[in-house]
Amino acid sequence: MPEIGSARQRTGVGAGLLLALVLTAVLLIALPDDGRQESDGCVPHTVAAWSADNRLNTEFTRYGDDAARTDDWTGGDGTHSVRLPDGRLLWLFSDTYLGQVHGPPNPVGESYAWRDGSAPLVRNSAVVMRDGRLESTLPAPLFPDPGPGQWRWPVGARVEPRSPGSSEQVLRVLLWVRTAGAAPWVYGVPTATEVATLSLPDLRVESVVEVLDQRTVRDPSRRVLFGTTLVDEGDWTYVFGGDDGQAASRPASHAYVARIPEGGLGDPAAWEYWDGSAWAARARPGAVLGDGRRTGVGSAFSVVRQGGTYVLFTMAAGARGLTTVTSYWACSPTGPWHGPAKDFTPALPPGQVAAYNPQAHPELSDGGRVVLSYDVNWLELTGAAAQLNRNVSLYRPRFVTLRLKPAG
């Protein structure tokens, strides 16, 4: 996936490479442009401290390197998570390697675990965690391709009533549909946003519905896919999305937002889009952030809510996006968004690698403590698949824990 993940179309390159060209890490909450503080409990926040989350990092290494099975997850990107009613945590991934992991050492004598070049690569997967331990991979791909030359990447997910007011709960997963395309759309052309409904507790895919078709938008760079991050407030779920302002590197794409009442994610008629001045059904979404130059987002970014403040984490615009993640803050999902501000560069393994797709995991966060993941991938397309197999740790999420506090 994305920072989408990437679409390793034909090359086997990790989904993340899409973002590999603009990457990064994550965090610090931006200060307002003019030093103002807002009312209604909305104030600027900043990161008081951060550290690697060694527990999560170690657990994903353990599970990915386990050679007991040949049909489970050994690496992936597009990292999202959702807590299920029975306490399990479901991890969703875009492009995913299965197969078996060997070593170390690898065939050229390096101290890295490795996988065979024939290892299966699927477009999406889901891994179940119980009590902090990854225990199984659901049959992959969980979401089949919608048609020839197309694929689905899962993004944000929510447990919600099967219908408004229902006592029965289901899992809803947002999906990005992409279609194979020529350069510069080597990672696929944005096509549509879908919502899958899964039964609980067995996680069986019951249906997939299309909520926003973008095929009628002639310019692929203006097509919007929703679901990179979801934030609940009252009876509404706010669903953020982005465009592919620049097909390959996307240094400064635009952010958008929709809202859906509780229980309505799977109902296209329930979706309302912010058009720049009001909420409206079937409206052309209007950007809430991004000027195409200094400010903007990667097509995969994350938003968290701290009291009355919304904080957005994304890759930096321009050349700094190769190493830097920045942030913005607002008092409303529709903005105005203040920033960008301070930067944060996460730890990376050696080599021509990139970090991308910063994602918050509220299920593991509490109070001012926020757990974020960032995906890692080989930076250059040429030979990427070989590098990812030669060192399996290159194509896995890393985790950091942040402590947030009001600024000033």
Image (cartoon, rainbow, N blue to C red):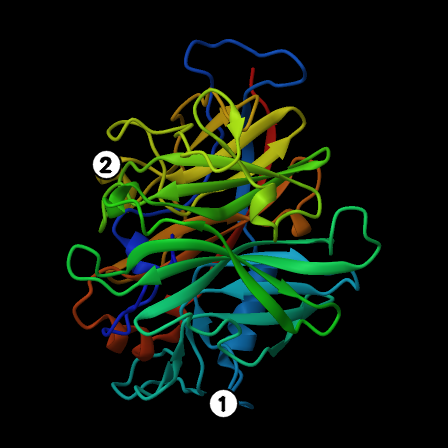
Give me the residue at 40% from left, 69% from top: 95
Q: Is residue 348 above or below residue 251?
A: below
Give me the residue at 47% from left, 10% from top: 35
**Quarter that holds the C terminus:** top right
Which quadrant of the figure has residue 276?
Answer: top left
Q: Amino acid at mark 2?
A: Gly
Q: Earlier in the sequence, mark 1 or mark 2?
A: 1
Q: Which residue is mark 1?
A: 70
Q: Is residue 338 above or below residue 260?
A: above
Image position of 66 (left or right of 301): right
Q: Amino acid at mark 1?
A: Thr
Q: Which residue is mark 2?
A: 318
**Quarter that holds the N terminus:** bottom left
Which x, y percent locates residue 341?
Answer: 40, 25
Count neighbours of disc 1 (C-alpha within 10 A) and say few if under 14, some if 14 to 19, many if 20 or more: some
Helix, strand or loop at label 2? It is helix
Which quadrant of the figure has residue 306?
Answer: top right
Which x, y percent locates residue 199?
Answer: 70, 68
Helix, strand or loop at label 1? It is loop
Image position of 221 (left or right of 44): left
Residue 6 in view: no
Which x, y percent locates residue 62?
Answer: 55, 75
In the depicted view, which residue is nearer to us: 260 or 183? 260
Residue 212 in view: yes
Image position of 393 (left or right of 87): left
Q: Is residue 326 above or below residue 199?
A: above
Give me the residue at 60% from left, 37% from top: 403
